[in-house]
């Protein structure tokens, strides 16, 4: 919560709907051409994509789809403003 209070202008917290809570993979998208993908949040196995815009595009699209389905989550203020 301290990070959200201090740097809330740089990021936001979103909450996925119940239907998507079973997703276990993690993505870290860097700049549209590079990414780090973990296939399951509990394991270190994954892949690093460096300067591979075609392959990163699919993961970027997946992230955008998840973003549209998610709802605003935590807020830094007590009132949620």
Image (cartoon, rainbow, N blue to C red):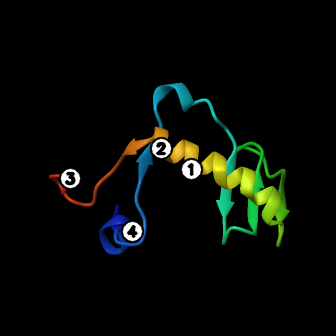
Q: Residue at x 36, y 47 (%)?
A: 73
Is disc 1 placed on a helix, strand or loop? helix
Q: Residue at x 57, y 43 (%)?
A: 65
Residues at badges 1 and 4 in contact (C-beta under 8 Å)? no
Q: Nearer the viewer, mark 1 or mark 4?
A: 1
Q: Position of residue 67 (x, y in %)?
A: 50, 47
Q: Nearer the viewer, mark 4 or mark 2?
A: 2
Residues at badges 3 and 2 in contact (C-beta under 8 Å)? no
Residue 54 placement: quadrant = bottom right
Q: Is residue 13 left or right of residue 25?
A: left
Q: Is residue 61 left or right of residue 19?
A: right
Q: Position of residue 24 (x, y in %)?
A: 67, 38
Q: Position of residue 13 (x, y in %)?
A: 41, 54
Q: Which residue is mark 3?
A: 80
Residue 66 placement: quadrant = top right
Mark on residue 3? 4
Q: Which residue is mark 2?
A: 68
Earlier residue among tags 4 and 3: 4
Q: Residue at x 68, y 67 (%)?
A: 32
């Amino acid at each position: 919560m301290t990070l959200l209070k201090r740097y809330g202008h740089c990021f936001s917290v979103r909450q996925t709907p119940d239907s998507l809570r079973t997703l276990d993979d993690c993505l870290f998208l860097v700049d549209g051409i590079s990414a780090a993908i973990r296939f399951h949040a509990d394991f270190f196995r994954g892949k690093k994509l460096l300067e591979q815009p075609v392959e990163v595009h699919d993961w970027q699209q997946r992230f955008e789809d998840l973003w549209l389905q998610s709802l605003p989550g935590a807020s830094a203020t007590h009132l949620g403003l």
